[in-house]
Amino acid sequence: MADRAIDAREVRNLVALFFDQAERFAEEPFVWAKRDGSYTPLTWRQTADAVLAAANGLAMSMSVGPGDRVIIVGENRPEWLIADLAVKAIGAISVPTYTTNTAVNHLHVINDSGANVAIVSTPTLAAPVIAAAAEADHKLKVIVFDDAESVIDTEIETKAWSDVLDAGRGRGMLEKVSSAKREDMCSIIYTSGTGGLPKGVMLTHGGILCNCDGATEIVKELGLGDEVFLSFLPLSHAYEHVGGIYLPICLGAQIYYAERVDTLINNMAEVRPTIMTAVPRLYETMRSRIHQGLKGQSKFRQGLFEKTLELGSKRYENPKSLSLWDKLVDAICERLARNKIRERFGGRLKALVSGGAPLNYDVGLFFTALGVRILQGYGQTEASPVISANVPSNVKLHAVGPPARGVSVKIADDGEILVSGEMVMLGYWNDPDATIAALSEDGWLYTGDIGHIDEDGHIVITDRKKDIIVNSGGDNISPQRVESILCLEEEVDQAMVFGDKRPYLTAVIVPDADWQKRWSNKNSVDKDHESLIKDPDFKSAISDTISRANNGLPVTEKVRKFVISAHPFTVENGQMTPTLKVRRHAVLREFREDLEGLY
């Protein structure tokens, strides 16, 4: 098969990248969405026609011009991709925004970005945007993909997406498509942020193209052909903005949109993706569900699974230790177990890619042992976002791989990882002080991560600079490491560790809901959640779990006391980011007094 990928180093802007590929693959399917129970596609040509119509319609009927900011709020769907490309085609700047945002969140983005137009997918998602627009310090027009008539009756000017497309049809290619340069700003992505107000990160066409080039070079080792991506992480996040739109375009790949997170496994079986990106939280959940599902299987199947894990782990960690008998049994495990597990993922998956947060070593080893390749990468919004990733030929589960092509990395005297290259942001929108703090005079980005580069040139991250706990004995402790070990226990769904300037660690624990139900049934306890977490026997069961996790930790990292949360950390209650990282300041706001009472 001819190479479908484009050399992103030779492309002048992201819109040109798309139109070049659309011309090559005109009538081939490109983006797929579930409609009436089955996946239906738009071809590359149909998508290109829609992008041109939307771009011309935005310019003609909504007065969007070069440099204007346009907010996009919607679930992952073809129209999201079309809107983003259309905005960029005008020379305007897209401002992707999370569907989980409240009116207060939207108000900050509207006022800070100065956007005059917001494109929203549904009336439900339009409601908080319109509420924010009513309080904004300037006028905002709202375009709605679906059922626009149900939101027309507001004081805010609203328009149907179909009307925008109709206004722009048949007007041909925009001049701006050819004039945008690599150094021009194309998007402002607001950091989800584990603390404080989100800052608008100014990204360029060249920065994202640099990411596409680096990522293409990494996945080429997998043997590229007609690739299929399954997209489900929010397109408003820099990770999926590249991994779910522009990398697939660069590779000439097809994109399927998952219905929901809870249908993901079924969608994988339907779509049969070749590459999929996700955050560690998803892989942790998958691991937990696989373990849980195994409990209902026969002793033979359980034994086969455990032997597959054992030998797969041995093969990764110390392949020379495999005896001839081990190799024979491992070959049987390959046929009877690993092949069936790969079928559950669709049967043609070349790699799962993990990013957005650190991947626990044991979780990575679990999938590797089961024959599912997992490549951990590293990045942040300010780097467009890709900095590094493991390459298929040299996977190190404890590391995040070597720098991607086009990325330079060095370690500061205090251990902070610094990066430079075309992918580094222009700065923070409307925030020169934060920009100065994040970028050196010669263009190096201060990542805020602590780590080192190993003998093979792989980046090893040990912690976030600002998250490190220094206990009263002066020991530096990585809370993320302790939390990830706690969350490997089946009884623990989420954890947040506390202990800065204290003699020992304490934690907020969120019990696993399924385990909690099983414990209640087994112990004939009929209590609501609020009462159950106060039950002495239930607390004792959690305490036993913490003790078990502590066995694998050094003295300074052991959790001595804990409180049990009455609710999970969620995006909705503000205690997790949209990419499922714990917002420590938000959890502490609720639990600080309880935690301090443990000392």
Image (spheres, rainbow, N blue to C red):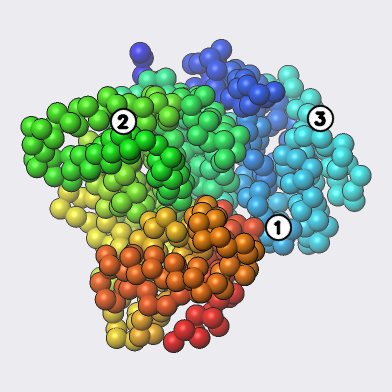
Secondary structure of the residue carrying tag 1 is: loop
Disc 2 target residue: 338
User: In the rendered view of the protein, which quadrant contains the N terminus?
Assistant: top left
Q: Nearer the viewer, mark 2 or mark 1?
A: 2
**In x, y percent, where is residue 57?**
75, 31
Discs 2, 3 touching: Cβ within 8 Å: no
- Give the CA separation, mark 2 to mark 1: 43 Å
Q: Nearer the viewer, mark 2 or mark 3?
A: 2
Above or below: residue 361 compared with residue 88? below
Q: Residue furthest front?
A: 524
Q: Judge whether residue 54 can be spotted in this image.
A: yes
Q: Residue at x 67, y 55 (%)?
A: 101
User: In the rendered view of the protein, which quadrant contains the C terminus?
Assistant: bottom left
Above or below: residue 362 compared with residue 59? below
Dot 1 amino acid type:
Thr
**In x, y percent, where is residue 569?**
56, 61
- Give the CA separation, mark 2 to mark 3: 51 Å
Q: Quadrant of residue 542?
A: bottom left
Q: Residue at x 63, y 26 (%)?
A: 34
- Give the CA separation, mark 1 to mark 3: 27 Å
Q: Residue at x 60, y 22 (%)?
A: 39
Quick check: 17 left or right of 445? right
Quick check: 32 left or right of 328? right
Dot 3 amino acid type:
Asp
Nearer the observer, 212 or 554: 554
Q: Residue at x 34, y 49 (%)?
A: 363
Secondary structure of the residue carrying tag 3 is: helix
Disc 1 target residue: 102
Q: Residues within 10 Å of mark 2 (few under 14, many from 20)?
A: many
Disc ID at residue 163: 3
